[in-house]
């Protein structure tokens, strides 16, 4: 494919990349506000170290493992170092976006995915163990899943596993189901925090939480609309759906709180925003406004109910990564099978060609898309959970995963970083 630069699409993708990178500091605020004062710096550092480690790995070999040639895993030698690569090697070459811009955009997805997992291990995981986990997990879980779905692997277009084409426009499977399943595995392996189920672990700074949710929502426009790799009508559809779905998810979450608890909360509003964003991510360009409203509302309600399951089943998913990202990711991915509305002739710039009709059950497409979406989602859950659990076991055997009980009680910030966020947190 001969490459012709499109300056408008390229400018949009540079902006979108910056927006998605901003999501990880936004996540640091979101998670940092949700933990206790004595853990806030450690929580935020887990996001920042994810940026540092994953960005370096992505340039060295991560892009090749994700988008290099190969049916099951990419070949890192195809793109090692990301130097001297022709622009027509980019998956977005057809939209006129240079290779390095596309590679930078995809790096931000790898970063945010592993950072999401950190919410499940708040207050109790060693920082060194987390840093090792980031490097190993992104290499043997994230890159293979991303390759399988987006890099020409077995879960992507014309999947040999399902016999059809699953839809994951911006990362319902690759990002949210993947991270959510990993979060569950780590939470089970680490065990519960001291006092879990007996004492409240209240957010120390709700304004931080709401600021973080706002930054995430802002960055998510790059996440979803940017995944079109062009400034066109499809990006516009994804952009609008990224407004609509989180908005209605907030209403769904607050409705559950009002009925169940008697009061709608700011934490619920912020969590509802994220739940709606998670659910619309895979479906952003494949559903109309009615579909976005339905997916957002279902996600808001189900995620609000799901966050309480940890008390029923006894796993300590500290900041509700499982309840929001795994459940929300499953909702968005599977409901594509009901609400997809892609007629013949629909074009996604990132796909590089016109798509065949891919309609959901409610739009005359039968059961095919629903079955396809469900199978791919379940494969991702199983793979991520099992491999993450094995990674955790290996790190635990070598150097340990969890801080001591004394450190957990006195505060992980001071023990792991030698500093505290507030004087009173000492």
Image (cartoon, rainbow, N blue to C red):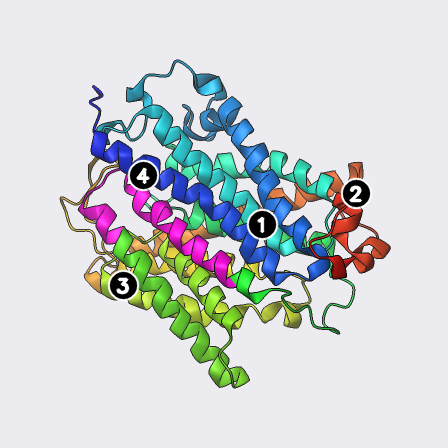
Q: In 3D space, how far apart are the residues under numbered discs 3 and 1 (Cα atoms)?
A: 28 Å
Q: Which residue lies furthest to the top in this view?
A: 84
x and y percentages locating residue 48 in the rendered image:
58, 42
Residue found 56% across the figure and 66% down from its top: 206
Mark 4 or 2, closer to the camera: 2
Q: State which tag comes first along the sequence, 1 or 2.
A: 1
Specify the quadrant of the image occupied by residue 253: bottom left
Residue 291 badge: 3
x and y percentages locating residue 100 in the rendered image:
37, 25
Q: In 3D space, how far apart are the residues under numbered discs 1 and 2 (Cα atoms)?
A: 18 Å
- The local secondary structure at tag 4 comes to loop
Residue 280 is left or right of residue 24, and the answer is left
Residue found 52% across the figure and 52% down from its top: 27
Q: In 3D space, how far apart are the residues under numbered discs 4 and 1 (Cα atoms)?
A: 27 Å
Residue 157 badge: 4
Give the residues drawn in magenta, as a range.
210-238
Q: State which tag comes first along the sequence, 3 or 2.
A: 3
Q: Are the residues tagged 3 and 1 within 8 Å (C-beta)?
A: no
Q: In 3D space, how far apart are the residues under numbered discs 3 and 4 (Cα atoms)?
A: 22 Å
**Residue underneath mark 2:** 400
- The local secondary structure at tag 3 comes to helix
Mark 3 or 4, closer to the camera: 3
The local crowd at label 1, few if under 14, some if 14 to 19, many if 20 or more residues have their Cα within 10 Å, is many
Q: State which tag comes first along the sequence, 3 or 1.
A: 1
């Amino acid at each position: 494919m001969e490459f012709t630069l499109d300056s408008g699409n390229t400018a949009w993708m540079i902006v979108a990349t910056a927006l998605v990178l901003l999501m990880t500091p936004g996540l640091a605020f979101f998670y940092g506000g949700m933990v206790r004062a004595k853990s806030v710096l450690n929580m935020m550092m887990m996001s920042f170290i994810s940026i540092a480690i994953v960005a370096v790995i992505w340039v060295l070999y991560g892009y090749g493992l994700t988008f290099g040639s190969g049916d099951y895993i990419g070949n890192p030698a195809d793109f090692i170092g990301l130097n001297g690569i022709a622009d027509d090697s980019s998956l977005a070459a057809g939209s006129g976006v240079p290779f390095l811009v596309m590679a930078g955009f995809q790096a931000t997805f790898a970063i945010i995915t592993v950072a999401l997992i950190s919410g499940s291990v708040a207050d109790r995981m060693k920082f060194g163990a987390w840093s090792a986990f980031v490097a190993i997990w992104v290499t043997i879980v994230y890159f293979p899943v991303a390759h399988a779905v987006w890099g020409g692997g077995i879960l992507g277009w014309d999947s040999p596993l399902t016999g059809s084409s699953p839809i994951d426009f911006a990362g319902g499977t690759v990002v949210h189901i993947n991270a959510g399943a990993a979060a569950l595995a780590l939470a089970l392996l680490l065990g519960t925090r001291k006092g879990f189920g007996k004492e409240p672990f209240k957010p120390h700074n709700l304004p931080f939480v709401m600021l973080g949710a706002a930054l995430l929502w802002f960055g998510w426009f790059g996440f979803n609309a940017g995944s079109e790799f062009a400034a066109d009508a499809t990006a516009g559809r994804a952009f609008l759906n990224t407004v609509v779905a989180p908005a209605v998810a907030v209403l769904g979450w607050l409705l559950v709180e009002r009925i169940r608890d008697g009061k709608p909360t700011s934490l619920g509003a912020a969590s509802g925003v994220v739940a709606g964003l998670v659910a619309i991510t895979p479906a952003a360009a494949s559903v109309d406004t009615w579909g976005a409203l339905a997916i957002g509302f279902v996600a808001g309600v189900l995620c609000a109910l799901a966050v309480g399951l940890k008390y029923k089943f006894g796993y300590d998913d500290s900041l509700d990564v499982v309840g929001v990202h795994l459940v929300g990711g499953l909702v968005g991915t599977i409901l594509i099978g009901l609400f997809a509305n892609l007629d013949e002739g629909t074009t996604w710039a990132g796909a590089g060609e016109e798509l065949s009709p891919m309609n959901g059950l409610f739009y005359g497409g039968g059961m095919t898309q629903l079955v396809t979406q469900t199978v791919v989602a379940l494969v991702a859950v199983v793979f991520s959970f099992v491999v993450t659990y094995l990674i955790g076991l290996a790190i635990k055997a070598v150097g340990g995963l969890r801080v001591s009980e004394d450190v957990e009680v006195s505060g992980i910030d001071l023990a792991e970083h030698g500093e505290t966020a507030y004087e009173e947190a000492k």
